[in-house]
Image (cartoon, rainbow, N blue to C red):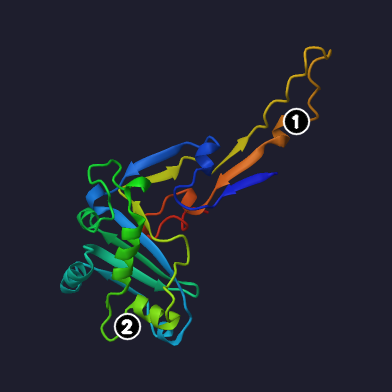
Amino acid sequence: LAAVFGANGFGSQVGEESGIRVEETTSLRPESAVGVICNFARMNGAAERRLRSFSMAKQFYLPLFKKVAATTGADLENIVYTKSHLSHYFVMTPSHRSLIEAGVVIDRGRRPLLARDNVDLDRLDALVRRIASFPFKAGEQPVLLASQADAGEEKVPYADSGPRLFDFSRMRRQAEMLTFLRPPPPPLPPPSVAGGPPASGGDEDEDCLLVAVVGDALLEPFWPEGLGIVRGF
């Protein structure tokens, strides 16, 4: 093995476990910095083909977002929908309060609030399905209903492991992009063996393992600005 590259997204432990220092910065107030990501699988039917991507913010569509909250229980600040060849990608920012009232957050007093074992995944699944079933664009079928029309009786699955909550009030980044790990020392010989350990076969530096982190694993993305992969290479 000559090199290891950590390209497994934000929250990656590859760099940290290899000795690269992690820096953390505070960017926004925690109560206004919660995001939800979800990817519904494409059914590749006629109804889906008519869908168009959109991006909306509460400050520009206040009446619509009030209706979203009343209908779905999600008090959103903004929502982005992108249709790709493989999935229907959503990223949105619900308030802490609406997540608690929807039962997504199990214990409101827990810190960190969005700890994995403090999130009810079934409630989160139900919430994002309600949001994806809401008609954000006039004259266009809601995304999940269009997918369901193409899926028939089958429930529209996710294109990945399911919806994910993240807190972007604190941003993590690796202090360095790469490091070199020296190989472990050779084992000591048994006491009965004379002459000590065998001599090294060459320059130790040549045997070092290159460990590098790239993309979102290097710089956690602040998604409203599209950072992460942009600066990670």
For label 1, count other residues whose C-alpha is less than 10 Å away and answer few (under 14), some (14-19) or many (20+).
few
- Out of 103 and 136, give the one closest to the viewer: 103
Q: What secondary structure is marked by label 2?
A: loop
Vertical arrangement, residue 226 with respect to residue 199, above or below: below
Q: Quadrant of residue 149?
A: bottom left
Q: Quadrant of residue 133?
A: bottom left
In this view, the mark in front (1 or 2): 2
Amino acid tagged 1: Asp
* Residue 28 location (% of width, % of height): 26, 49
Q: Is any atom of residue 158 visible in this view?
A: yes
- Out of 137 and 99, give the one closest to the viewer: 99
* Residue 189 location (% of width, % of height): 77, 19
Q: From the image, tell me which residue sits under label 1.
A: 203
Residue at (32, 79) in percent of width and height: 142
Residue at (46, 75) in percent of width and height: 42
Q: What secondary structure is marked by label 1?
A: loop
The mark found on residue 141 in the picture is 2
Vertical arrangement, residue 21 with respect to residue 27, above or below: above
For label 2, count other residues whose C-alpha is less than 10 Å away and answer few (under 14), some (14-19) or many (20+).
some
Q: Is any atom of residue 29 visible in this view?
A: no
Quadrant housing the N terminus: top right
- Say left or right for 85 vs 31: right
Spatial CA span between label 1 and label 2: 65 Å
Task: Give the farthest residue toward the right.
Answer: 194
Residue at (53, 37) in percent of width and height: 17
- Out of 31 and 202, give the one closest to the viewer: 31
* Residue 27 location (% of width, % of height): 30, 47
